[in-house]
């Protein structure tokens, strides 16, 4: 697993745009493991769960 949270966020956002919500959530959760207060990841999970 890459430790670059920017790369993980980019991947998660890309998956979200592709409507791959389950996978997007997994990547947003990886970001939160590295940075538990990351607001972008929290918002991404919320968006994905609304559509999933």
Image (spheres, rainbow, N blue to C red):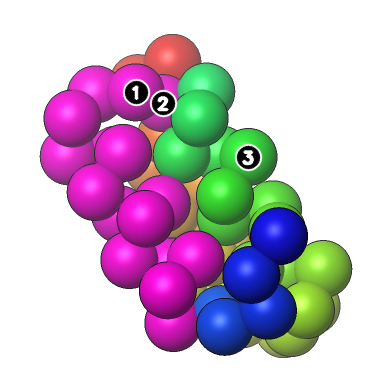
Whether pointer 2 and pointer 1 mark residues with C-beta atoms closer than 8 Å, the reply is: yes
Q: Is-magenta flag for residue 28? A: no
Calculate the distance from the C-alpha at mark 3 to the C-alpha at mark 2. 9 Å
In this view, the residue in front, 14 or 36, is 14
Disc ID at residue 39: none
Disc ID at residue 20: 1
In the rendered structure, which segment of residues is drawn in magenta? Answer: 6-21
- The residue lying at 24 percent from left, 24 percent from top is 19
> Above or below — where is 38 with respect to 1?
below
Residue 3, by quadrant, is bottom right
Task: Name which of mark 3 and mark 1 comes first in the sequence.
Answer: 1
Q: Position of residue 26 (x, y in %)?
A: 63, 40
Main SS of the magenta part reads helix
Disc ID at residue 26: 3
Quarter in which the N terminus is drawn: bottom right
Residue 49 seen in this snapshot: no
> Above or below — where is 5 with respect to 17?
below
Residue 32, by quadrant, is bottom right
Quarter in which the C terminus is drawn: top left
Q: Secondary structure at mark 3?
A: helix
Q: Position of residue 43 (x, y in %)?
A: 46, 60
Q: Which residue is mark 2?
A: 21
Q: Is-magenta flag for residue 14? A: yes
The crowding category of the residue bearing disc 2, from other C-alpha atoms within 10 Å (few below 14, some 14 to 19, many at least 20), is: many
Task: Name which of mark 3 and mark 2 comes first in the sequence.
Answer: 2
Calculate the distance from the C-alpha at mark 2 to the C-alpha at mark 1. 4 Å
Q: Secondary structure at mark 2?
A: helix
Q: Position of residue 48 (x, y in %)?
A: 42, 34
Q: Secondary structure at mark 1?
A: loop
Whether pointer 3 and pointer 2 mark residues with C-beta atoms closer than 8 Å, the reply is: no
Residue 4 seen in this snapshot: yes
């Amino acid at each position: 697993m890459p430790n670059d949270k920017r790369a993980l966020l980019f991947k998660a956002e890309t998956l979200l745009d592709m409507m791959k919500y389950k996978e997007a959530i997994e990547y947003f959760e990886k970001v939160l493991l590295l940075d538990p207060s990351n607001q972008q990841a929290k918002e991404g999970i919320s968006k994905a769960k609304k559509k999933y």
